[in-house]
């Protein structure tokens, strides 16, 4: 397959703004623009004296400057990196402490727009833009509310991120599970469902997927499958909600697969991918900065939701992030993410070594090449559910993980469980899996005793019957 750059902008078909009208929910269509925020851009015209907004006067704020130190992105270690001091003051600080545009600070929007060109080879003029949110989940919730009406079907890979499942449930979407395997979503399952969709019933407007380091599955979808999914989106006219917080945590020795956002240029029709990125896993989780990239009409709907809820993402945290990012530049940012990925690869290797040591013969798994999770299948003779073992018995034995059922939209039973390897030391990982091994061995012994007991009872009954 040729690189996505082989398709020139002139060859691309960019979907029109009118195309997205059918994808917007009733709420999104009925939401009126914020009467004040909608006029903010007019304040920027030279010579205009604005009496518009009820903004507090910056001279009343007690803050005069903020300084923080950051590590070098090109150092060889996260822990021993030299530090640089950055300061936000003057006009930068005044902007950081004030209300700002709903979609985000101009500087951050410009930097992340350039990042999408740097990382995904997408150029402006292809029908997309960016909006900043208070984390990518904030944007995901607003996107789903802006696209789906209560009762609308949504295609969801299974297993899926439990936080997304909670969103779909809260907004009363009808979740349609798409099967997966150790390489992620199965296009054959998706095609089967769509090709056999009941006649006369509205087809799903979108597919939700985490293509890198899937949460909880740990899978990273190969390019061939992504292209098949994109082709199905073209054939069956649905959007792809590409939730990608682990894109920059890729640590395989194989080339990184292109994103859906990048690959849609291959099918020469762009505008069906709504992408969600997050700085939580690579800069700071608590700073709560994410950004959505996609068709302008859909982002307008997301911004409309923001304008009537939390008004905007914190100007201050945006200013901190953009100060760091402009200091690093794109090459520096890339170098930092490479270093973070190497850090998590080491964590993965330590965890898998302990898995082999303690859970060999008791569990099965596929080694993740991105993300923070192991998704493992417990070998439970005579049982088809991990919930009681993981949620109760393992916890009672001093180890906490998540049973797989919470990641299935249907809530059905499963022998899978999820373990996160991002925080623990090597000693704690070894002890946690040793404790889990003890629980599983006890469970197997109990199961074998039950089988022998039943066999003995059956034998005595048979002897008694002969007499």
Image: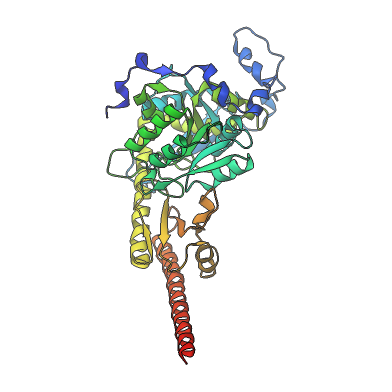
Give me the residue at 46% from left, 72% from top: 443
Query: Where is 422 relative to 295, above or below?
Result: below
Residues 128 and 431: in front is 128
Residue 405 appears at what percent x and percent y? 52, 55
What is the residue that sits farthest to the bottom in this orientation?
Answer: 467
Q: Is residue 344 visible?
A: yes
Q: Give the vertical position of 349 relative to 227 (above or below).
A: below
Say which quarter of the image contains residue 333: top left
Q: Position of residue 322 (x, y in %)?
A: 49, 30
Dividing the picture into quadrants, the one containing residue 101 is top right
Residue 76, how many percent across, how many down?
Answer: 32, 44
Image height of 292 relative to 423, above or below: above
Residue 245 vs 296, above or below: the answer is: below
Residue drawn at the location 33% of the way across and 55% of the way down: 349
| Left or right of residue 459, residue 131 in this image | right
- In the rendered image, which quarter is residue 175 located in? top right
Nearest the viewer among 155 and 407 is 155
């Amino acid at each position: 397959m040729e690189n996505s750059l082989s398709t020139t902008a002139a060859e691309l078909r960019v979907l029109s703004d009118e195309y997205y009208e059918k994808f917007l929910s009733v709420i999104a269509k009925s939401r009126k623009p914020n009467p004040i925020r909608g006029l903010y851009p007019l304040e920027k015209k030279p010579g205009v004296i604005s009496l518009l907004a009820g903004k507090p006067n910056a001279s009343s704020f007690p803050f005069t400057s903020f300084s923080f130190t950051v590590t070098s992105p090109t150092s060889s270690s996260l822990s021993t990196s030299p530090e640089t001091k950055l300061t936000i003051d003057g006009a930068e600080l005044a902007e950081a402490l004030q209300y700002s545009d709903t979609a985000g600070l101009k500087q951050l929007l410009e930097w992340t727009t350039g990042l999408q060109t740097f990382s995904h080879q997408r150029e402006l003029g292809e029908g997309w833009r960016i909006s900043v949110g208070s984390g990518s989940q904030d944007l995901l919730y607003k996107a789903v509310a802006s696209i789906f009406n209560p009762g609308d079907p949504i295609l969801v890979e299974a297993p899926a991120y439990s936080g997304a499942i909670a969103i779909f449930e809260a907004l009363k979407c009808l979740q349609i599970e798409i099967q997966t395997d150790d390489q992620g979503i199965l296009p054959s399952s998706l095609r089967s469902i769509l090709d056999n969709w009941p006649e006369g019933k509205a087809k799903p407007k979108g597919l939700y997927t985490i293509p890198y380091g899937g949460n909880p599955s740990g899978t990273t979808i190969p390019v061939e499958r992504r292209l098949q999914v994109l082709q199905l989106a073209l054939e069956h006219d649905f959007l792809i909600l590409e939730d990608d917080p682990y894109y920059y945590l890729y640590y395989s020795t194989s080339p990184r697969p292109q994103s859906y956002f990048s690959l849609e240029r291959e099918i020469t029709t762009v505008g069906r991918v709504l992408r969600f990125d997050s700085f939580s896993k690579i800069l700071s989780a608590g700073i709560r900065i994410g950004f959505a990239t996609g068709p302008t009409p859909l982002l307008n709907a997301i911004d409309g939701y923001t304008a009537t809820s939390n008004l905007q993402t914190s100007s201050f945290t945006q200013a901190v992030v953009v100060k760091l990012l402009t200091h690093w530049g794109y090459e520096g940012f890339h170098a930092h993410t490479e270093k973070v990925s190497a850090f998590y690869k080491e964590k993965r290797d330590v965890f898998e070594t302990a898995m082999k040591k303690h859970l060999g013969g008791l569990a099965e798994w596929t080694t993740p090449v991105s993300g923070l999770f192991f998704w493992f299948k417990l070998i439970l003779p005579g049982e088809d559910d991990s919930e009681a073992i993981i949620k109760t018995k393992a916890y009672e034995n001093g180890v906490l993980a998540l049973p797989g059922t919470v990641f299935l939209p249907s809530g059905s039973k499963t022998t899978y469980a999820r373990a996160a390897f991002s925080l623990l030391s090597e000693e704690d990982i070894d002890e946690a899996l040793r404790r889990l091994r003890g629980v599983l061995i006890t469970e197997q012994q109990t199961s074998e005793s039950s089988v022998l007991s039943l066999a003995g009872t059956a034998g005595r009954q048979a002897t008694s019957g002969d007499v």
